[in-house]
Image (tube, rainbow, N blue to C red):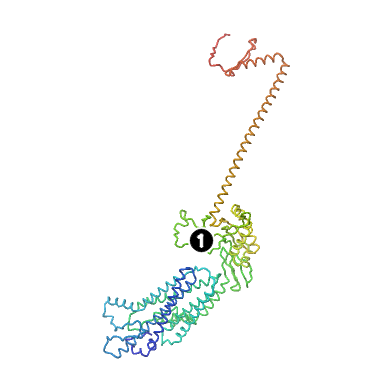
Amino acid sequence: MRLDLTKHAEQIGILPRFQLAKKRLPSLLLITRVCVYAAVILSLLAIFIRVFNASSLWIPLLCNNSAVLLLLAMVTKLAYHLDIWRVQAIDKTENDKHDKHDKHDKHDKHDKNINKSSTFSNQIQQSKFNSLYSIKTNIFYLIKTDVPLVIGLSSLILCILYWGWDFYLPAASSGKLNYAAAVLFVITAFSFLVIERYLFSLPKKQWPEAFMIGFVIRIVIAVQLLTVISLISIDSDSLWPLCLLVIIGCLPAIVTFELVIRSILSFFTPKREMLEPKFLGNSLIASMLDWPPQPFKQIQSELQSHLGIDLQQVWAFTFLRKAFLPIFCLMIFVGWLLSGISVIPLNERGIYERFGEPVKVLKSGLHLGLPWPFGRIIAVEYGIIHEVSTSNGNKTKNNLLPDNENTDITGWGTTEGRAPESANRLWDSTHRNEKSQIIASLINQKQSFHILNMDVRVIYRIGFNDQDALNSIYNTNDISTLVQSTLDRILVHEFASRTLDEALVEHRDILTSDIKMLMQHNLDQLVSGVEVLAVVIEAIHPPAGAANAYHAVQAAQITTQVLISKEKANAIQDKSDAYIKTTELTNSATGFAKETLAQAEADSIRFNTEKLAWLNTNQAFLLEYYLSQLSLALSTNSSPLLIIDHRLDADNMPTIDWRNYITPDNVKIKATNTGD
């Protein structure tokens, strides 16, 4: 209960918290300074480490411990200021006893250990001052109180915690430094435990703030012990110690937020300088670190002390308190029974285990089984496609953004923007998704090797049948690691029998088909349940350092091959021309011989025919032949010659078709009338 000097000033001398206030000041000041110095050293050490390694696990570790030490220093500083007020109140009361008539006496000089001192003003009647003076009084009271101290140190604590907050810490292995730091934190936690036990052993009337300082020390001990657990459990294969190392900072952050809110709300309470100040270091969250934990009791006491609400007098809350345990047990039992109901999504299957033995593979949907741990369902992928590359980097292969966080990424992914890094296929630059491979070669008739950079990716999934699902769970621990190691082994075996030129020139489809077949064969032998869908060779080329030299060699080879091809083309062209000419001459001679032979045969046939006609008709054939030759000789190109025998009489005159004859242009035909 806070003491009012205007009403109970005579009780100051008999209250233990006022009598022992002066003796506690050096201890509080020592604890405050030690915590501040330790927090400053840890913060500077974190800054020094961040300069050389921004992703070190020591940064959140040091920041969390520095922040919790500053929190303890702030609480002890608030208790220190409250004890100063008590010492000053005792001095003022003693001075008032010596001089009752002098109301405006100055206070005596304080003890040398007290750094801050202030004078008490007499009780002021609020009705005698106007509103302007009230505003000035509130501002002056704010400066004199601990509200700026709480807000300032709380802001610093939150900034330190935010500066050390990093969930993307790389995996690390434990070493001697981790164990040395763990031993140091254990010793420090034991020292704070001794102080905490001493504070809780004090009576509440002797020092009311001791319990709250003890609760804050418990937060310090909890942070340090969790830090020790994280340091000991750190492993290259485990990420939860790193996450725990970062999440530890939530505990001092929540308490700091509560203290800030309490300090801001305390500014709106009535200001009375003669009333014992309220301790701003009280924390409901910190007070819950007790055994057995009684959070509802703490909340009830807070409501009763601040708002005057007594929940013990409400029948409904009394009933809830009595029925809480059976209802809670019933809810736990029902929840345990509901653990036997499982929902499998569309892209998964489930292996149902009954008493640890796999019974069957369940499809997607709602399924009912025995509750845990008698029955459980292990999720298995169904149709999800994965991709594994030969890269050994820590970053994912699908990350298309640049490594530099300060790089302007405006326009990435658009038609007119910059191309992603994965689209860079130039040989003279190093690609993070590529892996170096040794390949056989022959240099100066001696066996040697070349170094080859390649980006080979395997697209796979778990098989659709139930046996593949069982094999993927019970025969394989890490499928992606298995596929990647199998791919690396096959690439070493496959490229061991190829030279650099063969690997670069050979058809990709044949090479990918061979690698895919070997991959599937090896995975089937391991009974992994993995189905290889495709093997994609993104790039195969020499290392970036030898790219220019190999370009020159390739250019010379290409030039030589071009010249050889040109000469071969010219030789083929000349051969084709000679063949064409020879063929033309052969065909011409053959055609002329055929024509001569045909003409001779025709002449022979005509001669035999004419001979036969002469034998049959004698003079008539000779006359007819003579006339035809004469007509042929006398006829012109414009009009043929017609010879008619004049010895023919009028009755036997032939009929002539004049359409077959063309009249010359210079001959005019006159019609004559011969009469009847």
Residue, far right: 615
Q: Which residue type carries mark 1?
A: Asn
Where 217 falls versus 492 (above or below)?
below
Q: Quadrant of residue 491?
A: bottom right
- Residue at 26% x, 88% y is 102
Q: Nearer the viewer, residue 68 or 440?
A: 440
Q: Is residue 385 visible?
A: no
Q: Quadrant of residue 500?
A: bottom right
Q: Quadrant of residue 92?
A: bottom left
Q: Nearer the viewer, residue 579 or 192?
A: 579
Where 119 falls versus 247 (above or below)?
below
Badge 1 element:
loop
Disc 1: which residue: 399
Residue 412 at what x, y percent from top left? 46, 57
- Residue at 38% x, 74% y is 152
Residue, far front: 444
Residue 184 at what x, y percent from top left? 50, 78
Number of numbered discs overlaid on the protein picture: 1
Q: Report whether 52 appears left or right of 129.
A: right
Q: Nearer the viewer, residue 513 or 627?
A: 513
Q: Nearer the viewer, residue 455 or 120?
A: 455
Q: Report whether 441 appears left or right of 164.
A: right
Residue 279 at what x, y percent from top left? 39, 81
Residue, far top: 675
Q: Residues within 10 Å of mark 1 (few under 14, many from 20)?
A: few
Q: Is residue 29 visible?
A: yes
Q: Quadrant of the C terminus?
A: top right
- Residue at 28% x, 86% y is 105
Q: Quadrant of the N terminus?
A: bottom left
